[in-house]
């Protein structure tokens, strides 16, 4: 993979003098599964599954045309990789995968005193997953004119999606002290906001950041933020207005194990 572009923040790990030759960053993180044994029966039931932070290594060679220049490069390399919480971007499948990471062990081997040195850097990615470097449309702007709606979506990536969902009320009647609910229509997990609604209101649900806004003002809510598994799914919208004309759209960043 010597020709594959790799960067850590603004620092390139794939240049004439810095050559990345191996990484295991594409290995999936450990899934910490908790199971409780069944009473009076064989087997167990899974009660919790949670990804652990991903630890991965990047290995390669530092090389210049002199011993002294390589030693200066070694210092430059260590300084660049000592900056925490940087985006490690690496080309994959014709796209770029991003892993927000911190180098926790920088090892350099230069014991032969040559104008080259081997490096092996151990990184910690707290989230355990990689992402795209851009947002994708999950649901194009769609009109809602009924009190219940189920809108089909298709989740890309290999891990759960936590999208940003925006819903704009164009017109409505009977919006006083009413509730607007958005759910994963498959799991029925979702959030509900109760308030005095009026035409022009915009509800924004940031499921990844666990925040809800109406007209850019943080709002209280009931329920749990939904997530969507990869593959076909559905966004559910329910309200108790008298009548409504709303527009909903959603975007997300694909995530990768």
Image (cartoon, rainbow, N blue to C red):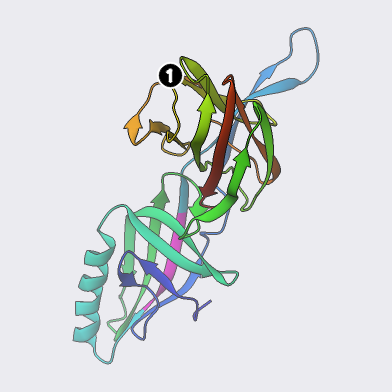
**Residue 73 can be seen, yes or no:** yes
Give percent across and percent down for residue 14.
40, 77
Which residue corresponds to mark 1? 195
The secondary structure that most of the magenta stretch takes on is strand
Q: Identify the residue at image location x=32%, y=68%.
A: 108
Magenta part of the chain: 56-61
SS at circle 1: strand
The quadrant in which residue 127 appears is top left
Query: Magenta stretch containing residue 58, yes or no?
Result: yes
**Residue 257 can be seen, yes or no:** no
Outermost residue on the right side: it is 41
* Left or right relative to 206: residue 37: right
* Left or right relative to 146: residue 172: left
The quadrant in which residue 40 appears is top right
Give percent across and percent down for residue 56.
47, 55
| Closer-to-camera residue (206/179) | 179
């Amino acid at each position: 993979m010597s020709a594959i572009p790799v960067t850590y923040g603004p620092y390139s790990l794939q240049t004439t003098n810095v050559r990345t030759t191996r990484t295991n960053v594409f290995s999936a993180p450990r899934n910490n599964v908790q199971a409780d044994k069944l009473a009076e029966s064989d087997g167990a039931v899974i009660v919790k599954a949670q990804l652990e932070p991903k630890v991965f290594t990047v290995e390669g060679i530092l090389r210049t045309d002199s011993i002294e220049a390589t030693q200066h490069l070694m210092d430059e390399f260590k300084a660049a990789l000592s900056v925490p919480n940087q985006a490690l971007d690496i080309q994959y499948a014709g796209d770029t995968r991003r892993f927000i990471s911190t180098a926790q062990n920088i090892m350099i081997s230069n014991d032969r005193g040559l104008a080259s040195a081997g490096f092996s850097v151990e990184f910690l990615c707290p989230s355990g997953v990689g992402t795209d470097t851009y947002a994708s449309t999950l649901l194009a702007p769609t009109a809602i004119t009924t009190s219940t709606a189920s809108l089909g979506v298709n989740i890309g990536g290999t891990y759960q999606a936590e999208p940003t969902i925006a819903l704009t009320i164009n017109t409505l009647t009977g919006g006083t002290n009413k509730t607007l609910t958005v759910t994963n229509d498959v799991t029925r997990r979702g959030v509900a906001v109760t308030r005095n609604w009026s035409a022009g209101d915009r509800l924004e649900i940031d499921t990844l950041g666990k925040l809800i806004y109406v007209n850019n003002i943080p709002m209280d809510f009931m329920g749990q933020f939904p997530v969507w598994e990869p593959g076909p799914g559905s966004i559910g919208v329910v309200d108790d207005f008298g009548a409504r004309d709303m527009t909903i759209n959603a975007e997300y960043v694909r995530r990768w194990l």
